[in-house]
Image: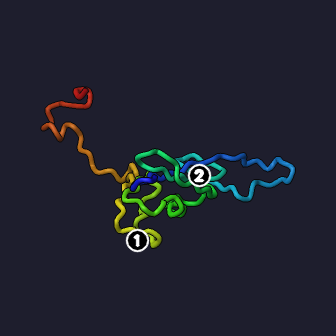
Amino acid sequence: MLREGSIVDASIISAPSSTKNESGQRDPEMRQSRKGNQWYFGMKMHIGVDDTLGLIHSIDTTAANVHDTVSAGNLLHGDEQRVFGDAGYLGIQKRDKHKDRQNVSWFIAKRPGCWPFRPPLSLLFGGQGLNSRHIP
């Protein structure tokens, strides 16, 4: 039933970080993680989805401070030819656990700072005063 492609992603599940409870402690399974400039306390839910049917085929939960690539092996069913992921999965194909997957094409998004250089429009059109307001 599952096809040859998977989409993998992770989402943070927030939990209260307060110690004002009966035991006076935080949940020992929860950890802190930073996403952008925002800090979160909780867990991560890692999800593997079939890329054509949209069916969830695997779920894994970890502490929020666990990197996405650590849990990625649990999200793949083994018959993939394509794997899609966000920038959190950069370098996954280089890990020892996934080096034997020679028939898999990895489509991992780059981080915004790593995108190729995009010249200004004035350089592209010979400096004739064309700017972004002239383009629909």
Residue hosting label 2: 45
Give the residue at x 52% y 53%. Answer: 57
Q: Which amino acid does label 1 sit on?
A: Lys
**Position of 80 relative to 50 (above/below):** below
CA gap, disc 1 and disc 2:
24 Å
Q: In which quarter of the image is the C terminus?
A: top left
The residue lying furthest to the right in this view is: 22
Residue hosting label 1: 99
Number of on-image labels: 2
Give the residue at x 45% y 50%. Answer: 50
Between 75 and 21, the one nearer to me in the picture: 75
Between 52 and 112, the one nearer to me in the picture: 52
Q: Which amino acid does label 2 sit on?
A: Met
| Colouring rule applied to residues | rainbow
Mark 2: few, some, or many residues within 10 Å (few <14, many ≥20)? some
Q: Contact, CB < 8 Å: mark 1 with mark 2?
A: no
133 lies left or right of 33? left
Q: Where is residue 29 in the image (x, y as percent from the top left)?
A: 70, 58
Mark 1: few, some, or many residues within 10 Å (few <14, many ≥20)? few
Q: Position of residue 64 (x, y in %)?
A: 61, 55
**Position of 73 relative to 57 (above/below):** below
Give the residue at x 12% y 38%. Answer: 126
Give the residue at x 64% y 57%. Answer: 63
Say which element carries label 2.
Answer: strand
Q: Position of residue 59 (x, y in %)?
A: 57, 54
For residue 29, which numbered disc appears in the image? Answer: none
Q: Position of residue 75 (x, y in %)?
A: 51, 58
Between 16 and 80, the one nearer to me in the picture: 80
Q: Earlier in the sequence, mark 1 or mark 2?
A: 2
Say which element carries label 1.
Answer: loop
